[in-house]
Image (cartoon, helix red, strand yellow):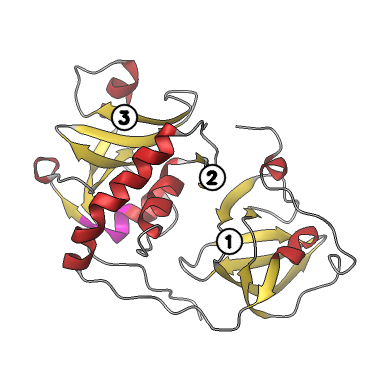
């Protein structure tokens, strides 16, 4: 993970960049970094070009608090990046999917992750725009590629999915890892005990790779298997709760 996530998505300053933006809904003209504090030093998530966000009245220093419309995720945007936003001409409207609709799309979701793995990448905390992802950012981007939205973080995705037994896993289901109290990692199930995920340097592969749900795997697979919490099936697309 780079020491300065600002360098991941560069933007140019404009004369209006230091002005406070008007409240309302905007659309991203380019990929955008969102940070977890007004200091804009630690990445919270990323918004791909075309996503919608709402600007709040909370301005601190050289940043403004926003939340993304598709998943209600909050973050801070640097005033220097306001030129990457334009007022939304049409408000974001969540698209409804049935469980059957989603099941038909799962091969494309899986293909997205496998294509992402083929590109040069590394694990990026807060990464949700290719080529560099964190675990839940990869899952969200993969489903978003077919129009289905998941919440942003692993524990939120666990709460959002329909819980299933490990023995019931099918391709396209989510597998959750972490502590007894909380899911801290998520992966996409492939088949035959294998799953694909973006894992970090400390106990993972520093990027996207495939591991196996077994005590017989290598050190990385074993480490995650010891943290296995359960599995979930995506049966709906997220509908925003904030207005």
Mark 1 element type? loop
- Magenta residues? 158-162
Mark 2 element type? loop
Q: Given this view, does label 3 or label 1 mark the residue nearer the observer? A: 1
Q: Given this view, does label 1 or label 2 mark the residue nearer the observer? A: 1
The quadrant where residue 195 appears: top left
Residue that sits furthest to the left in the current view: 167
Identity of the residue drawn at 67% across and 59% down: 76
Q: Is residue 160 magenta?
A: yes
Mark 3 neighbour density, 10 Å: few (under 14) some (14–19) many (20 or more)? some
Identity of the residue drawn at 55% across and 40% down: 125
Q: How many marks?
A: 3
Q: Earlier in the sequence, mark 2 or mark 3?
A: 2
Q: Is residue 183 visible?
A: no
The quadrant where residue 216 appears: top left
| Residue 21 point in image, percent of width and height | 77, 75
Q: Is residue 54 above or below residue 171?
A: below
In this picture, residue 170 sits left or right of residue 71: left
């Amino acid at each position: 993970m780079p020491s300065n996530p600002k360098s991941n998505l560069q933007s140019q300053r404009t004369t209006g960049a230091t002005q406070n933006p008007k409240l309302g809904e905007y659309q991203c003209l380019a990929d955008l970094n969102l940070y977890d504090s007004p200091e804009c030093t630690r990445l919270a998530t990323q918004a791909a070009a075309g996503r919608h966000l709402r600007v709040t009245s909370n301005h601190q220093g050289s940043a403004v608090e926003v939340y993304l419309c598709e998943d209600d995720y909050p973050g801070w945007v640097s005033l220097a990046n306001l030129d990457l936003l334009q007022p939304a001409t049409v408000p974001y409207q969540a698209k409804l999917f049935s469980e059957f609709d989603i099941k038909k799309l799962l091969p494309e979701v899986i293909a997205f992750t496998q294509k992402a793995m083929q590109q040069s990448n590394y694990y990026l905390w807060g990464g949700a725009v290719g080529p560099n992802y964190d675990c839940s950012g990869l899952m969200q981007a993969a489903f978003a590629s077919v129009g289905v939205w998941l919440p942003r973080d692993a524990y939120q995705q666990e709460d959002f999915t329909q819980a299933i037994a490990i023995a019931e896993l099918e391709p396209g289901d989510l597998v959750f890892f972490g502590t007894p109290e909380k899911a801290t990692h998520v992966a996409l199930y492939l088949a035959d005990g294998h799953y694909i995920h973006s894992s970090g340097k400390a106990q993972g592969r520093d990027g996207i790779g495939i591991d196996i749900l077994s005590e017989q795997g290598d050190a990385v697979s074993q480490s995650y298997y010891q943290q296995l919490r359960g599995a979930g099936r995506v049966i709906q697309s997220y509908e925003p709760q904030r207005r």
